[in-house]
Image: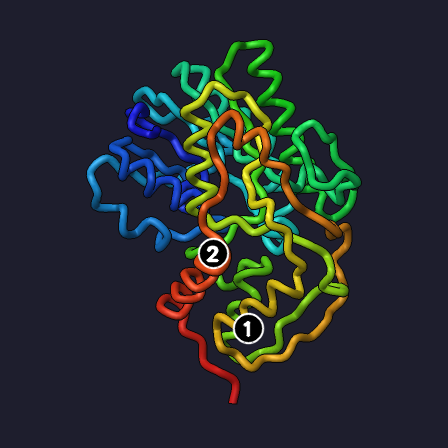
Amino acid sequence: MTAAFKRALVTGGAGFVGSHLCERLLAAGTEVVAADNFATAHTANVEHLLDLPGFRLVPRDVTAPLTEPGRFDVVFHLASAASPRDYFRLPLETLRAGSYGTEHALDIAERDDARFVLASTSEVYGDPKEHPQREDYWGHVNPIGPRSVYDEAKRYAEALTSAMRRERGVNTAIARIFNTYGPRMRPDDGRMIPTFICQALSGKPLTVAGTGRQTRSLCYVDDTVRGLLALAASELPGPVNLGNPHELTVLRIAEEILAVTGSSSRIDYIDAAVDDPVRRCPDISLARRELGWAPKIEMAEGLPRTVAWYTRNHPLEPLR
């Protein structure tokens, strides 16, 4: 489905999901320009792509106008801090990436009459009162809480994307991505999967927030990228949920990671984060029906792959 794209712009292309997306586009014969300011990404994520024909990595901050020459036929806007640790550290930058950054990426899509795909998030649903979450649910978000810098940046990005489609005829699509995991998440990312894996591999206690009974739905990164490409190749405007409808408690996820790593680490409980969602699970009926998409890689396969990557790339000294 990606072969139809001749040239793609991927903002946030050196990030976790962005680097996997660039990889898949290149494999399909698409020329790729990856733009990143490296605030939360690293060149190591795309180091294996740098010498490939058709790939170019450019240092760009999307909060400034994008002036990449040549015509693109698809623009993927992924540039943003995505983990609470990062957007708490970069609150204003996160808001600007969602506002100015989205506008500048949309400007490129309008200039080139390109398909535009916004990587939005399940965080637009906040701490949801509807379960599972469907795309027509408007959400339950604290607009001034600490998480609002990310939640509201993405909600604004969706509003701007939708307005550009209505008023200017830009060919846009919105993907609401649920918890994605896999290789290339930074060890210090702060999100659940890399934190638990690194704690387990180093023999430290796994720190479960709150009671551990809150739920998440984990989608392996290859499935998420496949969904983004399917959406780009379609005419669907979205928003469309991309996630795994298999819901698990955080405690269960911690236990699974202990089993995969063979760690004897204990589980410690820490205070829950402010506005941390109690339940999070997507309804993917729309993606199944319109895109023929559903996740294929179960946690029993995805977690070992992810742990193996950390073991190879970030060996940790066990506690003595």
From the viewer's side, name the closer residue of 164 and 115. Answer: 115
The label on residue 185 is 2
Quarter of the image for the N terminus: give it: top left
Crowding near the residue tagged with mark 2, few <14, some 14–19, many ≥20 C-alpha atoms within 10 Å: many
Q: Secondary structure at mark 1?
A: helix
Residue 108 rendering spot, x and y as whole percentages: 43, 21
Reading the image, the residue beneath label 1 is 258
Q: Is residue 180 left or right of residue 313?
A: right
Q: Quadrant of residue 264 in the image?
A: bottom right
From the viewer's side, name the closer residue of 257 and 284. Answer: 284
What amino acid is found at the position of numbered circle 2 in the picture?
Met
Asked if residue 143 shows in the view, the reply is no
What amino acid is found at the position of numbered circle 1 in the picture?
Leu
Q: Are marks 1 and 2 in contact (CB under 8 Å)?
A: no
Looking at the rendered image, the disc whose residue lies closer to the viewer, 1 or 2, is 1
Q: Quadrant of residue 93 in the image?
A: top right
Of the numbered discs 1 and 2, the one sitting upstream in the chain is: 2
Residue 15 rendering spot, x and y as whole percentages: 44, 47
Label 1, label 2: how far apart the Cα atoms are: 18 Å
The coloring applied to the image is rainbow
Asked if residue 146 shows in the view, the reply is yes
Outermost residue toward the bottom?
A: 320
Residue 208 rendering spot, x and y as whole percentages: 68, 67
Q: Is residue 166 left or right of residue 309?
A: right
